[in-house]
Amino acid sequence: MKHCTTLVAASLLALCGSGASNPAGQFPAAGSHSAVSPNRYPFDGQTIGKALLNTLVRQAPGGPDFDESAFEYPIVGPDGCTTRERVIIDGASEHTLGSPCTVLYPQWVSVWDVNVLVDPDEVDVAHMVPLEEAWYSGAWAWTAKQRRDFANDLSNSFSLRVLTASTNAERGSSDPAHWWPPYDGAHCNYAAEWVWVKARWNLSVDPAEYEALMTQLDETEYNLCRDKPVYVPPLGLNPGRGPAAIIGGIFTPSGTPYNLIGVQAYDANHKLVRETRVRVEGSYELTGLPPGKYTVKFLGGSSGTSDQWYSDVPGGPPEVLTLKAGTITSGITVAMVAAPGAVGSAAPAG
């Protein structure tokens, strides 16, 4: 056999189950908000997949007929190897070169279909978001350089990745409304990475694609996908296009999460724009926010804690958060303080 599955390869199962291809951890955290509590959720520069999905513009595919040549892929890099060759070299288990742009005696892990490939003829390189999908999601209106940068993006490990050639052919240009990896265990990472790439490049999602992604990213049976952290992507195109978001968490001074608390976002005119409630895990998401300046208020309600504004200084004045289009401000977390005269303490979540 030219390849074997990880159903009998323990090392690959460990890789597939570990979230090794997850956007979390791929990039340094960004942001400057200092911690009010040591248990911030998520950390600065982190988000979760469904909050990131809600920053994307939702609209039907559009544009002229697809022109693959407009993306100029692959290009030759400074080392003399093409983008495709570089992905294959970097994805190989053995980096001993047989020539400047090929490897000897390698194995390649194809995590979407749990294959270990040993025959170079079975190896292909897949764009996380296929070029045709990107074209109809907004890339048709880009400059030639922007399309070239997208198609040859080697700044991370999942925009371009090794995949079994037959699986890549089966997927074609399908979005998640029409195709998911054959290996169910890859679905969470696949959804998060798809959204990450679309957010990085200001690409839109169509309604069916949005629903398919949200169904996966809002999976709640075990909360494994819903709460998996994802780093906020650096934008490949500026400025962003979609709505913005604020996400974070609420804790007691001891670090216990509470879920009896409301969260509100007010604009620069002190008008209430969005409100939500904290989930049982102690986290919240304020999504669908127009770009602008915001302050965030936490309502203690029946939790036995006082209402308070988000501030970098506990008990200080409200901090103004500036949100740009298509961006997320994360780690906006407070340690709630008991209300004056409260008897005992509120019941913690869970």
Image (cartoon, helix red, strand yellow):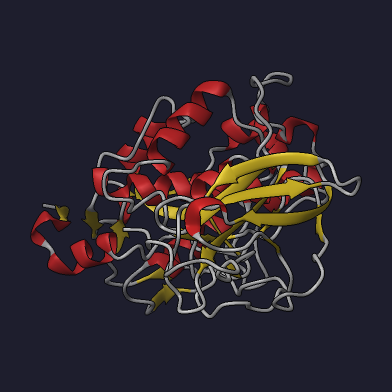
Relative vertical location of residue 83 with respect to residue 220 in this rendering, above or below: below
Q: In this view, does 266 lie to the left or right of 110?
A: right
190, 334: nearer the viewer:
334
Residue 85 rendering spot, x and y as whole percentages: 50, 60
Residue 344 rendering spot, x and y as whole percentages: 42, 70
Q: Residue furthest right?
A: 269
Task: Specify the quadrant that holds the C terminus.
Answer: bottom left
Q: Can residue 197 be seen in this view?
A: no
76, 7: nearer the viewer:
7
Residue at position x 41%, y 47% in the image: 190
Relative vertical location of residue 144 with respect to residue 123 in this rendering, above or below: above
Residue 17 position by quadrant: bottom left
Residue 37 position by quadrant: bottom right
Residue 114 rendering spot, x and y as whole percentages: 23, 52
Residue at position x 46%, y 35% in the image: 214
Residue 268 rendering spot, x and y as whole percentages: 89, 49
Q: Can residue 278 be seen in this view?
A: yes
Residue at position x 35%, y 62% in the image: 19
Relative vertical location of residue 249 with respect to residue 53 in this rendering, above or below: below
Q: Report the number of numbered marks.
A: 0
256, 141: nearer the viewer:
256
Q: In this view, does 149 lie to the left or right of 17?
A: right
